Image (spheres, rainbow, N blue to C red):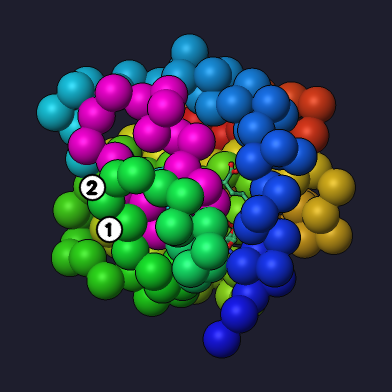
Amino acid sequence: MKTYFDEIAEGYEELHREEQMKKLNIIKENLIVRPGDRMLDVGCGPGFAKEVFDCNVTGLDPSEELLKKCSFKTVRCEAEDIPFPDSYFDVVISVTSIHNFDDYRKGIREMKRVGKSRFVFSILKSSKKFDKIKVFIEKNFIVKKAINGSQDFIMIC
Ligand SMILES: C[S@@+](CC[C@H](N)C(=O)[O-])C[C@H]1O[C@@H](n2cnc3c(N)ncnc32)[C@H](O)[C@@H]1O
């Protein structure tokens, strides 16, 4: 089934690259990532994270059209049901995606399950679900740093 993001995939990079790269660079400054690390990018879109992080990145997204733009390992699925074993990834990130999940609680629990100890959640502040998502993350993770960006609130856990 085509998603909203499949429909807008063609113009996505032109519209969003600059802003998303800014967020990713802020994340990079605040996160330890080693070349050998396995990283999962949940809701990876066209794969901007791979341009920023020099490690073994896997992108996860339900949008087939956005995944076609990724030139690295990807898996087409939803955050609510991640097809990897427990504690498989050294680092799990999700940038401006959580508000799109049908069930953000399930998605965040799944990210926790497949990750080890480094997580980053960049949450769109203008989303109606923002407060609830933030509280849910605070209940389930130790937030080491929170950065109040222009569009997103970035939680380094
Ligand atoms: C605003 S885009 C952000 C994409 C990318 N992280 C970036 O920085 O450009 C939101 C992404 O969330 C994805 N998405 C929507 N529902 C999802 C779900 N249930 N699980 C994982 N990703 C989802 C969309 O397909 C889209 O790629």
Asked if residue 25 is positioned above or below residue 122 in the image, the reply reads above
For badge 1, the amino acid type reads Val
Pointer 2: what residue? 89
Which quadrant is the N terminus positioned in?
bottom right
Q: Is residue 136 magenta?
A: no
**Which residue is painted at 77% across and 61% down in the image?**
129
Which quadrant is the C terminus positioned in?
top left
For badge 2, the amino acid type reads Phe
**Which residue is painted at 71% across and 29% down in the image?**
19
- N-terminal-most mark, 1 or 2: 2
Asked which secondary structure carries label 1, the reply is: helix
Asked which secondary structure carries label 2, the reply is: strand
- The part of the image, by quadrant, that contains residue 25 is top right
**Which residue is painted at 85% across and 47% down in the image?**
126
Q: Is residue 153 visible?
A: no
**Which residue is painted at 65% across and 64% down in the image?**
5
Q: Is residue 27 visible?
A: yes
Asked if residue 46 is positioned above or below residue 106 in the image, the reply reads above
Q: Is residue 58 magenta?
A: yes
The residue positioned farthest toward the left in the image shown = 36
**Range of residues picked out in magenta:** 44-60
- Inter-mark Cα distance, 1 to 2: 6 Å
Asked whether disc 1 touches disc 2, contact meaning CB atoms under 8 Å apart, the reply is: yes
Q: Nearer the viewer, residue 105 or 79?
A: 79
Give the image quadrant in which the ligand numbered 1 is located. Answer: bottom right
Pointer 1: what residue? 114
Mark 2 surroundings: few (<14), some (14-19) or many (≥20) residues within 10 A: many
Left or right: 66, with 119 as reference point: right
Asked if residue 13 is positioned above or below residue 99 in the image, the reply reads above
Q: Nearer the viewer, residue 19 or 68?
A: 68
